[in-house]
Amino acid sequence: MEKIVILTGAGISAESGLSTFRDEGGLWAQHRIEDVATPEGFARDPALVQGFYNARRVQAAKVVPNPAHRALARLQRDFPGEVVIVTQNVDGLHEAGGAQDVIHMHGILSGALCASCGHRWTAPPEMEVDEPCPACNAPTARPDVVWFGEMPYHMEEIFDHLASATIFAAIGTSGQVYPAAAFVHEAHAVGAHTIEINLEPTGGGFDDHLLGKASETVPKWVDRLLQI
Ligand code: APR
């Protein structure tokens, strides 16, 4: 039985209108990672960090899935084997496009987390500084996203999936950030066929490449897999 494990990055949501991180003019050209995407940055200036994520949360709520998100949902629905979507993205576009059981290894913009008691709830569109936790009332609400220096979520589950993958696809990710950048090596180690779907090759040692815009290449790839 074929098992496809898919890792997506910001590139799959670019054509929906969300900025990527490392492309020209991307988020890391506009903000310093250490200021807005680290626990230290949050401790130093919580208003700056909440503002950064509020802007992204408001923007993410305005955009819609593109044909790439929808094609992956079709693959999950119609493929005779298992299809697991792991995303580094914190937008909800995979789910909005119909995907099921998406594994958000870097968390999700729509989630809030209490830094004191670990309680999780649906974030308001704009989270205030010192927003009280609905469970313990401590003023320690933060976006439920994984910052640099923190452990990504669901790693054991992800490595279990990779250990039984027969196909691994990395879609719209620059392969600059670990542990996600190492997934292709885990897949190769178990003999999976690996394919990179991107505007250009990122040099991760993939068996195959499908170059072009995700909204065009991903539906083509899915048609090929479903032999349409
Ligand atoms: N179609 C396909 N690929 C695209 C498109 C597109 N329309 N637009 C951009 N890309 C590709 C770029 O070529 C690049 O390889 O998407 C990738 C985007 O790379 P990054 O901006 O580095 O985003 P990502 O790989 O998701 O970053 C990983 O880094 O900062 C952290 O937590 C953040 O989850 C993020 C992680």
Image (cartoon, helix red, strand yellow):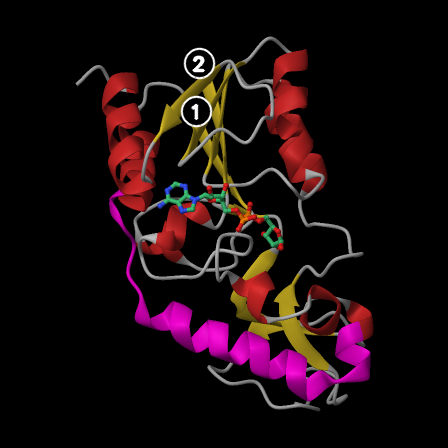
Density class for disc 1 (Cα within 10 Å; few <14, some 14-19, many ≥20) is some
The magenta region covers 41-67
Residue 63 as seen in the image, left or right of residue 5? left
Image quadrant occupied by the N terminus: top left
Q: Can you give x and y, in whole percent of width and height, for residue 209 in the image?
A: 43, 21
Residue carrying label 2: 2
- Asked if 190 appears above or below 46 in the picture, the reply is above
User: Is there a contact, CB below 8 Å, between mark 2 and mark 1?
Assistant: yes
Q: Residue at x 45, y 41 (%)?
A: 172
Q: Can you give x and y, in whole percent of width and height, for residue 171 in the image?
A: 45, 36
Q: Is mark 1 within 8 Å of ligand 1?
A: no
Give whichever of 219, 28 is nearer the camera.
28
Q: Report the disc number at residue 158.
A: none
Distance from disc 2 to disc 1, alpha carbons, whole Å, reads 7 Å
- Asked if 162 appears above or below 110 in the picture, the reply is above
Please check the rendered image and state whether residue 173 is part of the magenta-colored stretch, yes or no. Answer: no
Density class for disc 2 (Cα within 10 Å; few <14, some 14-19, many ≥20) is some
Q: Is mark 2 within 8 Å of ligand 1?
A: no
Q: Residue at x 55, y 31 (%)?
A: 202
Would residue 95 be visible to someone looking at this image? Answer: no
Residue carrying label 1: 82
Element at label 2: loop
Give whichever of 29, 126 is nearer the camera.
29
Image quadrant occupied by the C terminus: top left
Q: Quadrant of residue 183?
A: top right
- Asked if 93 appears above or below 131 in the picture, the reply is above
Q: Residue at x 75, y 83 (%)?
A: 140
Would residue 119 be visible to someone looking at this image? Answer: yes
Element at label 1: strand
Residue 177 as seen in the image, left or right of residue 202? right
**Residue that lies at the very extreme toward the top in this rendered image:** 191
**Residue that lies at the very extreme toward the front in this rendered image:** 24
